[in-house]
Image (cartoon, rainbow, N blue to C red):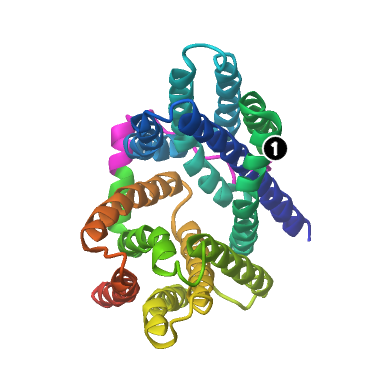
Amino acid sequence: MRQKNVDLQNSNRIMLSSITSRVGNAVFDYANKMILVSVFASRPLLMSLYQSSETMIGIVFNLFAGAFADKVNRKKILIVTDFLSGITCLIGFLFLDTPYLYLAMLIGNILLAILSTYNSPSYNAMIKESITEDYIETHFSRFTLAKEIFSIASPSIGVLVWQLFGLKVSYLFNAATFLFSAFISSKIVIQLPPKEKKKKESVFKQITEGLQYMFKHKTIMYLLIISAMVNFFLSGYNLSMPYLNNYFAKEMSNFFGAALIAESVGAIVFSAVNTRLSKDKKKEVSQNKMLVFLVLCGLSIALLPLQDAVFKNAYLSLVPFALMGGFLTMFNIQFFTIVQKSVDSEYVGRVYSVIFTIAILFMPVGSIVFGFILNPANLLVMLICGIGVILSVVLYKLLMLGK
């Protein structure tokens, strides 16, 4: 009973710490973008530099961050990165009434992106240290449920803070959320015994060891492959979504917004159901179950153009998005639970950094590829992406059979 209480408390602290800083980031990002589209409206290049800076930072620093998370005390990484993020926002606040406004915003965004890159693998690695295996799936279900709820609420909070208080308070709000997040992280209880101290190794050697570990453990390698393929096809799905506003313009004024809400509702409902089911001790996480959810996700995407060809109803077309959001959530819960249970604690930071790096790399590649074949007048890309996700499962099964 005591063990379960520690798991629950740690799960709550990890969720609260992560979600608090996410809400702060949403407010910060919204405020910055509002300044860019108002004060710097005639210079759209500034917006592109602001947005692309985060992606570039992720590509450059992700692998190093994973190695760092496996080398240094992860709890300290969380506390220090959140604390430094809060200080960064406070320093940025001092430059808001100066001629260096844009430079302060850009540098602040870059520094926060670097700190986030080191923070993220540590959060995920901490799960293995602070939550027992029996509770991991329940944690991911609860965490996903909370994230989806706040993904809907965060933009509204951003708009509210911006409209009521403006840019300065948005920066102070973000600083406060980071400092609060650091405080909550300090309360997480580590349950695994401390790691044995090893001789100092270079970061590059650690990255090499992490890659060798992944190549040696085929299951992990194949999980990374399916993650890459799914991200590739989902980039086409995400690319197509805004253009659905034009496709369904005669029937609905903002189909894209409605589709995003439908996705979130599906994710929330399915997460809540999985949270209930994951409390059943007899219920096991399995790769087959993960693959079934992924096939259902692909079928949901492919269902959109198929049902549109038959019924031509915009409101009915929202159903596939709710199903897709739900099944993708179930896949992610199973995927990350399997990763947590399969990877040694010593390597979990590096494995997560590779997963995030693959996502960062394959999403833009997919966007470029599907950008060439996208035709806003039809839903062909949606059909291709749905079938592509299903074929990813087929390839994964073939790889597992030849293992």
Q: Quadrant of the N terminus?
A: bottom right
User: Percent x, y for residue 2?
Assistant: 78, 56
Q: Residue furthest right?
A: 1
Taking the image as shown, residue 52 lies to the left or right of residue 143, namely: left
Foreground pick, 135 / 305: 305
- Check residue 232 for magenta coloring: no
Q: Residue furthest bottom?
A: 310
In the image, residue 300 sits, relative to residue 55, either above or below, namely below
Q: Residues within 10 Å of mark 1 (few under 14, many from 20)?
A: many
Is residue 124 in view from this perspective?
Answer: yes
Q: Quadrant of residue 280?
A: bottom right
User: Percent x, y for residue 330?
Assistant: 52, 69
Q: Which residue occupies 63% across, 47% down?
A: 154
In the image, residue 109 sits, relative to residue 103, either above or below, namely below
Q: Which residues are magenta?
A: 186-208
Principal secondary structure, stretch drawn in magenta: loop
Q: Which residue occupies 53% across, 76% down?
A: 315
Q: Quadrant of the C terminus?
A: bottom left
Q: Which residue occupies 41% across, 40% down?
A: 66
Residue to which mark 1 is pinned: 184
Is residue 132 in view from this perspective?
Answer: no
